[in-house]
Image: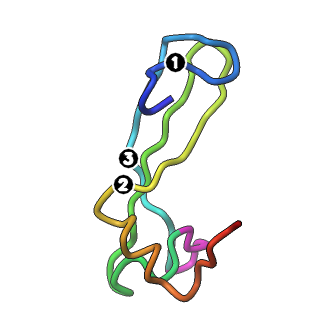
């Protein structure tokens, strides 16, 4: 969705984007170890306006920190 600007479920092209907090504090932290403890991480959300399918993406600025974090394990 992010790169193709097309929904992977219905091939719709009515895509909406928002940037949201990744949690922390009283909410579950979706990017543990990828941001300072005093500031929440950010996620990009893409939503298809045709079928409602959505996807989360980690912005480039946090991606290297996710790879370094001991809270994330490589999935093979």
Label 1: which residue?
6
**Left or right relative to 49: residue 37:** left
Instruction: Determine the CA span between mark 2 and mark 3.
Output: 9 Å
Q: Residues within 10 Å of mark 2 (few under 14, many from 20)?
A: few
Q: Nearer the viewer, residue 73 or 47?
A: 73
Q: Residues within 10 Å of mark 1 (few under 14, many from 20)?
A: some
State which quadrant residue 65 falls in: bottom left
Secondary structure at badge 2 equals loop
Q: Which residues are magenta?
A: 25-30
**Left or right relative to 4: residue 55:** right
**Mark 2 or mark 3: which comes first in sequence?**
3
Q: Which mark is residue 19?
A: 3
Magenta-drawn stretch contains 28: yes
Label 2: which residue?
59
State which quadrant residue 29 falls in: bottom right
Residue at the limit of the structure toward the left, as seen here:
61
At x 43% / y 82%, what residue is drawn? 68
Magenta-drawn stretch contains 40: no
Quadrant of the rendering where the C terminus is positioned: bottom right
**Mark 2 or mark 1: which comes first in sequence?**
1
Is disc 2 in contact with disc 1, using a CB cutoff of under 8 Å?
no
Secondary structure at badge 3 equals strand
At x 51% / y 18%, what residue is drawn? 6
Is disc 2 in contact with disc 3, using a CB cutoff of under 8 Å?
yes
**Mark 3 or mark 1: which comes first in sequence?**
1
């Amino acid at each position: 969705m992010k790169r193709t600007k097309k929904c992977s479920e219905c091939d719709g092209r009515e895509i909406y984007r928002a940037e949201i907090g990744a949690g922390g504090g009283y909410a579950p932290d979706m990017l543990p170890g990828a941001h300072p403890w005093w500031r929440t991480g950010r996620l990009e959300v893409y939503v298809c306006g045709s079928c409602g399918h959505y996807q989360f993406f980690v912005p480039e600025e946090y991606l290297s920190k996710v790879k370094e974090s001991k809270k994330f394990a490589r999935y093979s």
